[in-house]
Amino acid sequence: MPRRRRCACWPGSAARRDHGGVTRAALDVDEAVFDVVDRIPVGRVCTYGGVGRLVGVGPRRVARALSGGGGGAVPWHRVVRADGTVAEPVRVEQLARLAAEGVPIRGGRIDLAAVLWP
């Protein structure tokens, strides 16, 4: 999986870029979310809340980070809802990717007892 590239305006860089009014703190949270999601092993899943607890934010903030476009370079499909379901707009693709990794799916839900990480 390709590594995502950090913006040149990250701390320590002389470059500056407009992020459409997004603060550096928000970008730092996004990066922290991506780092945790990148660590989820193949064949395992984590909930939005689980990622949020590791980062120190709520599950909705995790979802926002992943849906903002930057999550495409990380295994976003390994993050699911607390009840084992997936988001409707990406349901077919997400379930197909998880099934290809050997994640058990029953009735459109992930068997969290078998594959929950960490």
Image (cartoon, grey):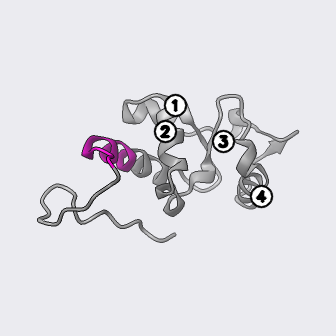
Identify the mark nearer the N-term, 3 or 2: 2
Q: Residue at point 62% right, 38% down? A: 116
Q: Which residue is mark 2?
A: 62
Q: How far separated are the C-alphas under marks 3 and 4?
A: 16 Å
* Residue 115 badge: 3
Q: Secondary structure at mark 3?
A: helix
Residue name at image x 56 percent, y 57 percent = 75
Rate crowding at label 4 as few (under 14), some (14 to 19) or many (20 or more) other CA atoms within 10 Å: some
Please identify the quarter of the rendering in which residue 33 is found.
top left
Mark before the other along the chain sequence, 4 or 1: 1
Percent x, y for residue 38?
A: 47, 54
Q: Is residue 7 left or right of residue 83?
A: left
Dot 4 or dot 2: first in sequence order is 2
* Disc 3/disc 1 C-alpha distance (Å): 19 Å
**Amino acid type shown at disc 2:** Val
**Residue 20 percent across, percent down from the top left:** 35, 52
| Mark 3 crowdedness (10 Å alpha carbons): few <14, some 14-19, many ≥20 | some
- Mark 4 in CB contact with mark 2 (< 8 angstroms): no
Say which residue label 4 marks: 96
* Extent of the magenta region: 21-32
User: Looking at the picture, which amino acid does disc 1 mark?
Assistant: Pro
The answer to which of marks 3 and 1 sits earlier in the sequence is 1
Residue 72, position as x, y percentages in the image = 53, 60
Give the residue drawn at x 71%, y 53%.
94
Q: Is residue 28 above or below residue 75?
A: above
Q: Amino acid at mark 3?
A: Val
User: Is 11 left or right of 108, judged from the image as shown?
Assistant: left
Identify residue for label 1: 59
**Front position among marks 4 and 2:** 2
